[in-house]
Amino acid sequence: MPPGKPQPPPSSSAPEPAGPSAPDGLLLCGARLTDGRTVDVRLSDGRIEAVGTAGSLDTTRGARVDLTGYLLLPAPAEPHAHADTALTADGGGPVSYEAEDVQRRATEAALLQLGHGATALRAHVRVGDVQGLGALTAALRAGRALRGLAELTAVAVPRVLTGAAGADGLAMLRDALKMGAGVVGGCPDVDPDPTGYVEAVLEVASEHGCPVDLHTDGADPARLARIAAMAGGLRPGVTLGPCGGLARLPAEAAARAADQLAAAGVTVVCLPQGGCGGAEGPWPAPVRLLRAAGVRVAAGSGALRDVSNPVGRGDPLEAAYLLASCHGLRPEEAYDAVSASARAVLGLPEVRVEAGFPAELLAVRGDRLAGALSLSYSRIVVHQGRVVARTSAVREFCDSAAAVELGLPRQGRGELS
């Protein structure tokens, strides 16, 4: 490394160079599963080929990764990111929407989230106004550059779709879908005619066979009822988020809205780490109420170090930790919100650590899910059957008679200066 160029810190995530999976597959050895079993897992052609008790699978084929001391989980997914504004909190001025700047930020943000474990992301990108289609073009380029490391789907988010000003927004939204945006998004709360806005979005989505993902605070129960009535039966589906206003409604009104969303098959993506630019505040949705009504609830990260949340981490395990520690979900339910439910929002197939399922996996240092959510520093991320990111953390303590006497575990035993 050239003199004067700093080396990355030990805890940084650095994905391996992109390339095909090993021809003989990959063997994950000695991994702990959430049911307590210790297993070996063979991966081949992007899928899980076999799962057997530790030491039972052929170790002479392909590469091996020792997962002793790690808990092996289905990889999380990120259902609510903002690719065009990520990493702008320290910019000291207006956000730059120059194509090169957006592409760089979107790529860096996706890699940060990949290091946390998210192998698939849904990124909301504004279209129209000063951005035009430039920010979307840059996000789509970032997605193509990330192929083999992570899957990035862009959501086109127009501002106004009704009235005289709405004609341009509708035309740009249709152009965005032709360019490669995979989801129709939007913010009905900021349009002069929220109901007309939703009608326009649903019409365009129906024309193109695209899913819908709308930002709404959810504080207006009548508006939520209209959205639910219009969205019922639309395929491939409607997602709302972050819906923090639901938590501020009277209990009876909130319960009625939850029942209406459940009946319409609408998914809610909450943002336990904080709000985003498309929401009115950082309040989280009432996840227990929604789940009790039968609403599928996924959890996203929202803002990643932009003006809405200058310290946003983009970490799905932190979102799960907050759901468990602050919102009363069991660890298994909380992790489902960032993994199975999040993947369902993105239209991705289910992942289980069983033969035949996609090899989209996250190994976290620990032996129980609760512990992994509490202190999940070291991680190994697998996408399409190969390791694409590693994060390693080593904790060291200076010599202590108490630690020796009690036999406390230590990861490092070197002297500290």
Image (cartoon, grey):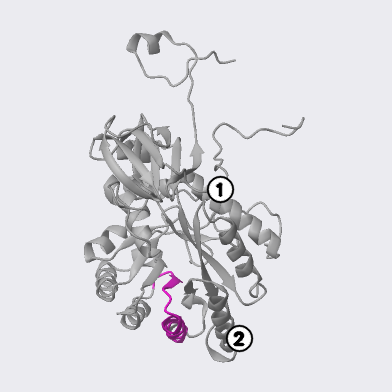
Asked if residue 142 can be seen in this view, the reply is: yes
Q: Secondary structure at mark 1?
A: loop
Quadrant for residue 50, please give it.
top left
Residue 215 in the magenta stretch? The answer is: yes
Q: Residues within 10 Å of mark 1 (few under 14, many from 20)?
A: some
Which quarter of the rendering shows the N terminus?
Answer: top right
Which quarter of the rendering shows the C terminus?
Answer: top right
Earlier along the polypeptide chain: callout 2 or callout 1? 1
Tag of residue 168? 2
Relative to 131, does residue 43 appear above or below in the rendering? above
All told, the count of numbered labels is 2
Which residue is found at the position 55% from the left and 42% from the top? 16
Tag of residue 33? none
The kind of residue on which mark 2 rests is Asp
Asked if residue 370 can be seen in this view, the reply is: no
Q: Which residues are magenta?
A: 196-219
Q: Is residue 138 left or right of residue 280?
A: right
Q: CA distance from mark 2 to mark 1?
A: 40 Å
Image coordinates for residue 246, horizontal then vertical, percent: 35, 67
| Foreground: disc 2 or disc 1 | 1
In front of the other: 47 or 201: 47
Which residue is found at the position 23% from the left and 65% from the top? 294
Which residue is found at the position 60% from the left and 59% from the top? 142
Image coordinates for residue 151, horizontal then vertical, percent: 49, 58
Q: Residues within 10 Å of mark 2 (few under 14, many from 20)?
A: some
Residue at image mark 1: 18
The kind of residue on which mark 1 rests is Ala
Q: Secondary structure at mark 2?
A: helix
Residue 351 in the magenta stretch? The answer is: no
Q: Is residue 355 left or right of residue 346?
A: left
Relative to 55, does residue 104 appear above or below in the rendering? below
In front of the other: 37 or 405: 37
